[in-house]
Image (tube, helix red, strand yellow):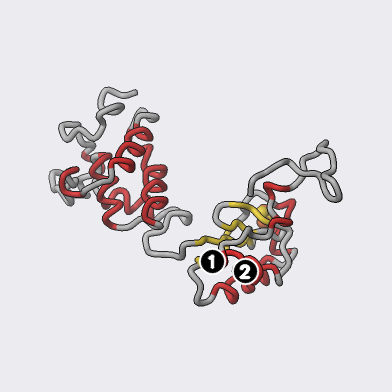
Amino acid sequence: MSPVDGPGVSNPNLPVDQAVTEGRVPGRREEEIPELHEVDCPAELRERIETLMARYPDRKSASIPALWAVQERYGWCTPEGIRQAAAVMRVTPAYLESVASFYDLLHTEAVGTHRIEVCTNISCWMRGGDELLDAFRAAAAGEDVFVTGFECLGACDIAPMASIDQRYYGPLEVAEAATAIDQLRDGAEVLPAKALAKRGLAGDAPAPGGAATNGGDA
Ligand code: FES
């Protein structure tokens, strides 16, 4: 834990790293760091970000998980959510916005309640990933669902696959895209037979009447 971080990190008397407050012109202050009393940060979010900051020698290293916490609370990295995180971390909102805009999994504009990433990298592409992405996009039109293509999600053995609300599914048939969207809309369990969390592990005993299971809770 560095002398300037750790518990009480949202103390407004903390020294501020000039690298995140000044632009290319030395001495020119480009943006003020918001004060906590100006942003009305929910206590739960503030405590979570402070806990994250305490894990790193440099509190800026907590930027990505802090933004993830903002996104989980508000659905996306809202300008006000970013200001709240910036006030807790004692960095400028612009600094956190620059981080958020760099990463595909952080959203700087409103997206749907549900998020689907369809892998279109080599293994999935060879097994119809592009067609699967098209099918998800068509099925999600007008729905509260954000669909995007994505590079390898690290589950090539179940190609073609997709991540639906941070859970992996595959191998998927094109027709299952519409089924998954219907289930999301209805609040039903999504494609239980294709959930990676329910796949058997090597050495597992076969489940009664079916494949082995690892007891996942997807
Ligand atoms: S290529 Fe699709 S998960 Fe790796």
Tag count in the figure? 2
Q: Is residue 61 above or below residue 99?
A: above
Residue 191, position as x, y percentages in the image: 68, 60
Contact between marks 1 and 2 (CB within 8 A): the answer is yes
Residue 74, position as x, y percentages in the image: 36, 55
Work out whether residue 164 or residue 191 is closer to the camera in this orientation and state it.
191
Q: Quadrant of residue 14?
A: top left
Lateral position of residue 14 relative to residue 59, left or right: left
The residue at the point 43 percent across, 54 percent down is: 106
Q: Quadrant of residue 85?
A: top left
Mark sitting on residue 133: 2
Task: For label 1, count other residues whose C-alpha is less than 10 Å away and answer few (under 14), some (14-19) or many (20+).
Answer: many
Task: For label 2, count other residues whose C-alpha is less than 10 Å away and answer few (under 14), some (14-19) or many (20+).
Answer: many
Label 2 element class: helix
The residue at the point 85 percent across, 43 percent down is: 206
Q: Is mark 2 within 8 Å of ligand 1?
A: no
* 1 or 2: tag closer to the N-terminus: 2
Residue 199, position as x, y percentages in the image: 74, 47
Lateral position of residue 192 relative to residue 211, left or right: left
Q: CA distance from mark 1 to mark 2?
A: 8 Å
The residue at the point 73 percent across, 54 percent down is: 158
Q: Which residue is mark 1?
A: 147
Q: Amino acid at mark 1?
A: Val
The residue at the point 62 percent across, 54 percent down is: 152
Lateral position of residue 149 relative to residue 22, left or right: right
